């Protein structure tokens, strides 16, 4: 057999022939086709529905369905089934994301539009002492919220951090399993139950009519501790064991390894989780209704008497507006706007802390 005949019958030659027979390049839709298709569908569906009475919800649903079917069909004809399926899934995920954004955008728009009417200097430098109609502010509620949340954070953060360190670094056996179980149970406790627990605890020592800011801080700490434990525990678990082993190989004790290696490595995630836990409990209303109550004047002592907080202030302003109603409702919306701004500031602070304290890779 000649060399040319062997070359013609070689597997490589047969593979090249089979590859040549397969189409290598398929058609592809232009990059602008999704946007042009979306505009066309919106115009067509809008024109059809406007003749029968346009409904925004019906318009959005019909437009999404028609657009998904049209893009899938066009992509399947031009690009093939795999690319068409990819485009269809992308459209479904994007539509689900936009649907999830609707309540958030609605809440933000409503609170901002309604709360700007009383977003003035008087709202932030005066209380409701002696105010019946117009005027007044929520300075006492802002200070009460900051004081009670600060006390809750001071109690919850050390307990949560130490509990997470024990579970990750030392915890074994029945005690660790029991702690993990109770942390899971506390994560699902309704906020009103935490408030009732704190109220019952302080009623044993101060009587059934007790109302004080420290009781509200205890109720918030019950809700905050499991969040701190869970977030810190997850951050400690992602620290590579090689770092611990390298420290142990140098003869460093375990407690010093945790203090100097594990915690600095995970401090960014821990700080973020703690900040988000503070933001989560700051807007709680039910525990503070039971334990703290409402005050119209300034009280900066959390161990003596009632205190005002922004969630309770907004709640009572809305459900008991008085006569006339408009000033109280305006104060309620502005209090909600201020509370959202504080929570947003804490979330931005968490992002900043995460970026500043993140381990340097270079």
Image (cartoon, rainbow, N blue to C red):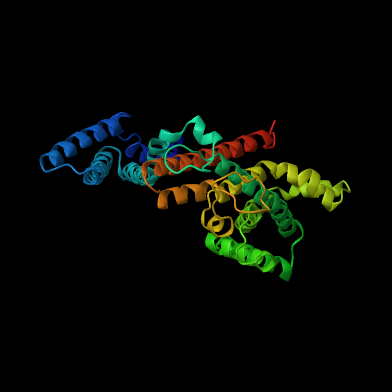
User: Residue visible at 68% across and 53% down?
Assistant: 303
Residue lying farthest front? Answer: 130
Q: Is residue 266 left or right of residue 186?
A: right
Name the spot of residue 76 as percent of width and height, x first.
27, 42
Quarter of the rendering occupied by the N terminus: top left
Q: Is residue 162 left or right of residue 342?
A: right
In the image, farthest residue toward the bottom: 174
Residue 220, quarter of the rendered image: bottom right
Left or right: residue 254 versus residue 21 is right
The answer to whether residue 356 is left or right of residue 187 is right
Q: Considering depth in this image, is 100 or 38 the residue closer to the camera?
A: 100
Measuring from the top left, give residue 50's x and y in whole percent: 14, 39
Measured from the top left, where is residue 282 in percent x and y? Answer: 56, 48
Q: Closest to the observer: 132 or 225? A: 132
Q: Can residue 29 be seen from the camera position used here?
A: no
Closest to the observer: 38 or 200?
200
* x and y percentages locating residue 61 in the rendered image: 25, 46
Count of numbered labels shown in the rendering: 0
Which residue is nearer to you in this view: 32 or 306?
306
Residue displayed at 33% across by 40% down: 22
Residue positioned 38% across, 38% down in the render = 114
Outermost residue, right side: 251
Picture quadrant where residue 221 is located = bottom right
């Amino acid at each position: 057999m000649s060399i040319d005949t062997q070359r013609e019958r070689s597997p490589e030659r047969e593979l090249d022939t089979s590859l040549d027979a397969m189409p290598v390049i398929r058609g592809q839709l232009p990059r602008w086709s999704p946007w042009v298709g979306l505009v066309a569908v919106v115009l067509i569906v809008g024109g059809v529905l406007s003749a029968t009475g346009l409904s925004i919800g019906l318009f959005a649903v019909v437009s999404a369905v028609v657009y998904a079917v049209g893009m899938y069909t066009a992509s399947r004809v031009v690009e093939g089934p795999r690319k068409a399926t990819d485009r269809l899934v992308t459209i479904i995920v994007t539509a689900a994301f936009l649907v999830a954004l609707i309540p958030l955008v609605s809440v933000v728009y409503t609170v901002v539009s309604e709360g700007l009417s009383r977003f003035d200097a008087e709202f932030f430098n005066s209380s409701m002492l002696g105010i019946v109609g117009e005027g007044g502010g929520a300075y006492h509620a802002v200070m009460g919220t900051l004081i009670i949340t600060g006390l809750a954070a001071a109690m919850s953060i050390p307990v949560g951090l130490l509990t997470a360190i024990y579970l990750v670094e030392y915890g074994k056996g029945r005690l660790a399993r029991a702690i993990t179980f109770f942390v899971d149970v506390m994560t699902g406790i309704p906020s009103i139950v935490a408030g009732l627990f704190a109220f019952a605890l302080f009623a044993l020592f101060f009587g059934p009519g007790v109302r004080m800011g420290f009781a509200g801080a205890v109720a918030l700490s019950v809700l905050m501790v499991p969040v701190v434990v869970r977030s810190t525990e997850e951050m400690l678990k992602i620290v590579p064991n090689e770092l611990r082993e390298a420290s142990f190989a140098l003869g460093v004790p375990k407690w010093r390894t945790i203090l100097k290696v594990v915690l600095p490595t995970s401090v960014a995630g821990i700080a973020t989780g703690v900040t988000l836990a503070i933001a989560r409990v700051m807007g709680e209303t039910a525990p503070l209704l039971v334990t703290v109550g409402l005050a119209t004047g300034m009280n900066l002592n959390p161990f003596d008497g009632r205190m005002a907080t922004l969630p309770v202030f907004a709640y009572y302003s809305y459900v008991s507006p008085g006569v006339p109603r408009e000033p109280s409702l305006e104060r309620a919306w502005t209090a909600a706007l201020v509370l959202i701004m504080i929570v947003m500031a804490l979330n931005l602070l968490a992002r900043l802390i995460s970026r500043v304290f993140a381990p340097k890779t270079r």
